[in-house]
Image (spheres, helix red, strand yellow):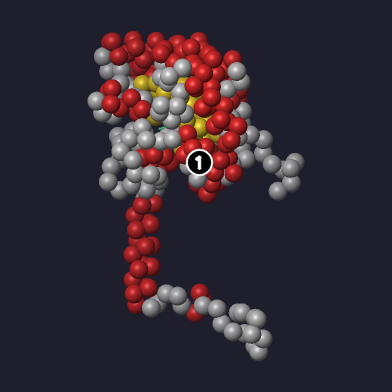
Amino acid sequence: MSAQARPTRITTRQICQRKGGSPIVALTAYSTPVARLLDAHCDMILVGDSLGMVLYGLPTTLGVTVDMMINHGQAVMRGTMRACVVVDLPFGSYGASPEQAFGTAARIMAESGCAAVKLEGGAEMEATVAFLVARGIPVVAHIGLTPQSVNTFGGFRVQGRDEAGRHHILEDAIAIERAGAFAVVIEGTVEPLAREITAALRIPTIGIGASAACDGQILVTDDLVGVFQDFTPKFVKRYAEIGGAIEEAVAAYAADVRSRAFPGDAQTFKVAGKSPTQEG
Ligand code: KIV
């Protein structure tokens, strides 16, 4: 494809300008081939630290490292031309101070080429978000059920069901907007609260388990295509059953190898004519 024919990338500013407009479509990707499949359809692609659980089989996202995020961020950037790519700051890499957050975010952006970073937290991260934004790092904040705080929450529980929770999460959203985040992911909250936050903010809200009241939606791609067969969270709609298809294909391959039906003639190189260097 020539340089002129390349689609221009959606910017963080364009994502922000989608507030109240046509819903923002966002999904996670961790690899080049999946990013290629998503690119034409998504406004934003998140290299989420969910990769720790989805790809590496970790019990939570807490074991994810900055190097992992950079490697997968680079892979996703190689597979995209159009979507705005955002990379998660992993647990322990930004919470100590704005300076720590800047060091991590700057390294991730410089080494992966992504457009922005996402971090978890609300009011307690206000100063950090402002520090990053003032230094050229666009930030998406993540509030509500923040998976890096799973040990504080005592599990993956829907947040904001009672008045104290509602007030807390609304204050988080307002603080994050004040700090200059260009969008906010709201995870695992009840619909009235997501609606209230979306109405209160000038930046777009992107929901995951936070109802259709948000300005956009994000899901973990592996959830929506059904890679896992054991557990589907309530907020996920499965659009395909890739896990079942992979298992069927693998079982058929195993049977073919055992019966010597694979490789067949079509997959076998033959000597063509008299030349020993020619293969058919
Ligand atoms: O890590 C992730 O994939 C996320 C999304 C679920 C929002 O943070």
Horizontal relation, residue 98 to residue 11: left or right: left
Residue 239 picture location, percent across and down: 40, 44
Residue occupying the point 24% across, 25% down: 154
Write the residue at 30% across / 17% down.
160
Q: Is residue 67 above or below residue 37?
A: above
Relative to 211, does residue 123 appear above or below in the rendering? above
Q: Quadrant of the C terminus?
A: bottom right
Residue 33 spot, x, y in % from top left: 52, 49
The quarter of the displayed image where residue 192 is located: top left
Query: Does residue 50 appear in this view?
Result: no
Residue 210 in the figure: left or right of residue 275: left
Q: Residue at x 38, y 44 (%)?
A: 56
Q: Residue at x 42, y 74 (%)?
A: 262
Q: Residue furthest left?
A: 154
| Residue most extreme to the bottom | 274
Counting the numbered discs, the total is 1
For label 1, the crowd category at 10 Å Cα-Cα, with few meaning under 14, some 14 to 19 and many 20 or more, is: many
Cβ of mark 1 under 8 A from ligand 1? no
Foreground: 209 or 274?
Answer: 274
Q: Position of residue 128 (x, y in %)?
A: 49, 16
- Which residue is labeled 1 in the image? 72
Q: Nearer the viewer, residue 109 or 235?
A: 109
Q: Quadrant of residue 110?
A: top right
Q: Position of residue 149 (x, y in %)?
A: 33, 25
Relative placement, left or right, of 253 versus 2 is left
Q: Is residue 145 left or right of residue 265?
A: left
Residue 105 visible in image: yes
Give the amino acid at mark 1: His
Secondary structure at numbered mark 1:
helix
